[in-house]
Image: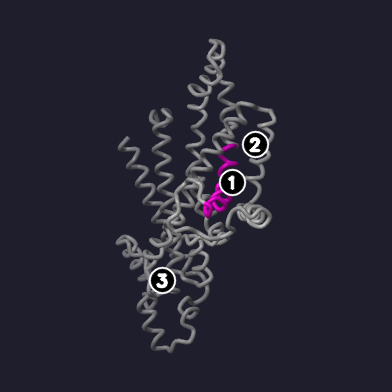
Amino acid sequence: MCKYVLKRVLYMFATMFVIITLTFAAMKAIPGDPIAAKYDKASPEVRVRIEKIYGLDKSKTEQYFVYMKNIIQGKWGLSIAQPSKTANKIIEETAPASARLGVTALVWGLLIGVLCGIISGAKRNSIWDIIITIITTLGIAVPNFVIASVLQYTFTYRFPILPPIGWETHGSWIILDRYIILPAVALAFGSIATYSKYMRESVTEVLKEDYVLLARAKGLSKNKIMLKYVLRNAVLPIVTISAQQVAMLLTGSVVIESIFSIPGIGKYFINSVTQRDYTVIMAVTIFYSFIYMLSMFVMDLLYYKVDPRIRLE
């Protein structure tokens, strides 16, 4: 176990090193001057002082090594658009809203998607299977920003039940909150469809296994067969795709937060792109990458625990 964990940790750090390097290179390769975009009327003397503050007076090689040193020390740089704040401070202020939305969408997507998949797989070709398949197809094919627009029109303009935009800073987690319902559903819709699709296929395959047929021959009830034999083996693919769903929720939250005016990292990331705030863009990219790699690491450990074949290898 220790050897496996060490191997995954080294892989995670190596991947993060590559991501940080590529992110830095991409930002430096983008045409345009971020200082000029913010301080277009500054005198040459002021401009020189500003470039010195941001380390832009050094060569790109020197900037890279200084940047890597600061990353290791946990310093992600000073924002260009908001000079009074560091990228660390911006992420610290905006991360709670993004985390609350992402965790809520992840939990809803997992619970609802797995439940729909079980029903669809256990009652194949029934009316429930047809309805769930249609919803699953829509969830996979339709982008989440379209789902968000439909939800806003339906539940705020057509039937004014929920607010179209807004956010409660100290709102509740996971449980129903009037401001979090629409964005969480829009963000989780794709995850629900994906979990449902994989769970349906997995349940269908497990139901054909010999040990399930033997359990039926012994006269065991359907509920006992589902709980003891089917679900335990059918859940393995769900563990595999969970890390991918975390990545989808991270990228999807960027758009959803802007649509619903949620003060999270995603909304600020889009503002940083329009303002050419390269420091914050790099910091958010690295932060998202770290969260994704951490989720991959956790899912690998879970898969190691639930699948004995990994331990044998």
Q: Quadrant of residue 313?
A: top left
Q: Amino acid at mark 3?
A: Ser
Answer whether labels 1 and 2 touch (C-beta < 8 Å).
Answer: no
Q: Nearer the viewer, residue 218 or 37?
A: 218
Q: Nearer the viewer, residue 32 or 38?
A: 38
Q: Nearer the viewer, residue 205 or 113?
A: 113
Which residue is tagged 1? 189
Quick one: label 1 or label 3, which is nearer the N terminus?
Answer: 3
- Residue closest to the far front: 160
Which residue is tagged 2? 132
Q: Callout 3: few (<14), some (14-19), or many (20+) C-alpha neighbours within 10 Å?
A: many
Q: How far from the left and from the top, in percent, is residue 311?
A: 38, 30
| Range shown magenta | 178-196
**Residue 188 covered by magenta stretch:** yes
x 57%, y 28%: residue: 203
Q: Nearer the viewer, residue 293 or 154?
A: 154
Callout 1 secondary element:
helix
Q: How far from the left and from the top, in percent, is residue 102?
A: 48, 50
Cα–Cα span, label 1 and label 2 = 12 Å
Q: Quadrant of residue 197?
A: top right
Looking at the image, is 41 positioned above or below residue 208?
below
Q: Amino acid at mark 1?
A: Phe
